[in-house]
Image (tube, rainbow, N blue to C red):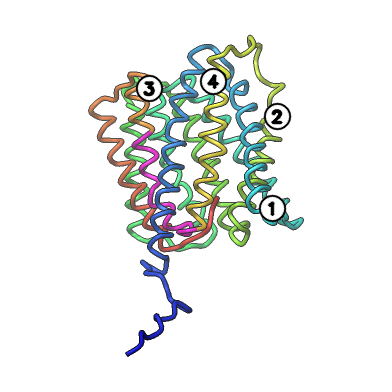
């Protein structure tokens, strides 16, 4: 009896989880985790540069310009069609890039006054602020949302150590940074969600670079960056801007924006860990309680975002 024909593989489907192919899900999770690891190192590296006397804009401007050039190279080499964007999208990317530039500058200024671990914990309340913005736009706020908001605000109070150990100006700068960053995400959510993530990444970072270059003349008098300062710039440009955004874009492509948001707390935890290991920062008992409250709020926020997926870069 002759051998039968092997079964056809035409139309064969790959195993899926939640509508996403298992191997794509694995690659997507690894990409987003890689992006979170890259981003988590940046506050500690920036803090090292500021400790050496560099001006925030002196570190920020070349970081974003170099990161933008690397992103353009990557998209042009891998998905050149994604460089095209219509006039409306270009205008909204310019708005998002300008807002992102302002939030980054406030973060750098705050790092001159507070520890990197405290900075990341306070910044992590931005999903709660975003919730308020979405509510003002007309989206309903339920009891769970109010609990998240309360946890975030209580966490900030503990992390800021109201007794006076943390610089209050630095705390205000970080709350301003979180608010402006929430506005940036709000613009992405409401005006740019229909565009491919890689297109948004390259154009927003381009306008972000223009924004910080325009701010550069307002920096105070500084000495030229030394080798350590340029090391900070290169690290934050390669890992914190180019590789992090490339990895996040890949994760969004494979998982969608809602699933990508689930790993947001990992970046915060890793950032605090790097600050503790490299900078020797320590947080007190009340601040640990505050960190737990903030992270709980962030975890609830990621569940909220998973149920309202949006592809963000």
Residue marked by disc 4? 231
Magenta part of the chain: 254-270
Spot occupied by residue 15 in the image (x, y as percentages of width and height):
37, 69
Question: Tag 1, which secondary structure?
Answer: helix
Question: Tag 3, which secondary structure?
Answer: loop
Query: How far is the residue under mark 1 from the one under mark 4?
Result: 30 Å
Let me know if residue 268 is in the magenta part.
yes
Let me know if residue 165 is in the magenta part.
no
First along the sequence among labels 2 and 3? 3
Spot occupied by residue 249 in the image (x, y as percentages of width and height):
53, 50
Spot occupied by residue 1 in the image (x, y as percentages of width and height):
32, 90
Question: Tag 4, which secondary structure?
Answer: helix
Residue 213 circle label? 2
Q: Residue furthest right?
A: 87
Query: How far is the residue under mark 1 from the one under mark 2?
Result: 26 Å
What residue is rendered at 37% in x and 61% in y? 142
First along the sequence among labels 1 and 2? 1
First along the sequence among labels 3 and 1? 1
In the rendered structure, are the residues bearing label 1 and label 4 in contact, judged by CB atoms less than 8 Å apart? no
Question: Tag 2, which secondary structure?
Answer: helix
Mark 1, Cα crowd under 10 Å, few <14 / some 14-19 / many 20+, is few
Q: Nearer the viewer, residue 30 or 201?
A: 30
Spot occupied by residue 244 in the image (x, y as percentages of width and height):
51, 40
In the rendered structure, are the residues bearing label 4 and label 2 in contact, judged by CB atoms less than 8 Å apart? no
Q: Nearer the viewer, residue 127 or 154?
A: 127
């Amino acid at each position: 009896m002759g051998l039968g024909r092997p079964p056809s593989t035409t139309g064969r489907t790959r195993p899926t989880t939640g509508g996403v192919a298992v191997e794509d899900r694995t690659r997507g999770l690894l990409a987003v985790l890689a992006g979170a690891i890259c981003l988590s190192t940046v506050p500690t590296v920036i803090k090292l540069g500021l400790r050496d006397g560099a001006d925030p804009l002196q570190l920020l401007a070349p970081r974003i310009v170099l990161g933008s050039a690397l992103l353009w190279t990557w998209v042009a080499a891998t998905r050149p069609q994604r460089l095209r964007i219509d006039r409306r999208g270009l205008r909204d990317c310019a708005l998002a890039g300008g807002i992102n530039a302002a939030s980054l500058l406030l973060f750098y200024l705050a790092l001159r006054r507070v520890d990197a671990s405290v900075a990341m914990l306070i910044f992590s309340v931005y999903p709660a602020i975003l919730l308020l913005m979405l509510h003002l736009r007309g989206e309903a706020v339920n009891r769970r949302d109010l609990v998240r908001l309360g946890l975030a605000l209580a966490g900030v109070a503990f992390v800021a150590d109201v007794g006076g150990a943390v610089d209050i100006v630095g705390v205000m700068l970080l709350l301003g940074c979180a608010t402006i960053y929430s506005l940036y995400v709000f613009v992405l959510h409401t005006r740019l969600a229909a565009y491919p993530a890689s297109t948004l990444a390259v154009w927003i970072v381009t306008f972000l670079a223009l924004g910080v270059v325009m701010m550069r003349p307002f920096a105070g008098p500084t000495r030229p960056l030394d080798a350590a300062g340029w090391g900070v710039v290169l690290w934050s440009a390669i890992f914190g801007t180019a590789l992090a955004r490339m990895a996040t874009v890949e994760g969004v492509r494979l998982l969608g924006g809602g699933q990508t948001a689930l790993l947001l707390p990992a970046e915060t935890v890793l950032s605090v860990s790097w600050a503790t290991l490299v900078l020797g920062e320590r947080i007190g008992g009340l601040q640990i309680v505050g960190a737990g409250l903030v992270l709980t709020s962030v975890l609830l926020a990621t569940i909220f975002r998973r149920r309202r997926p949006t592809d963000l870069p």
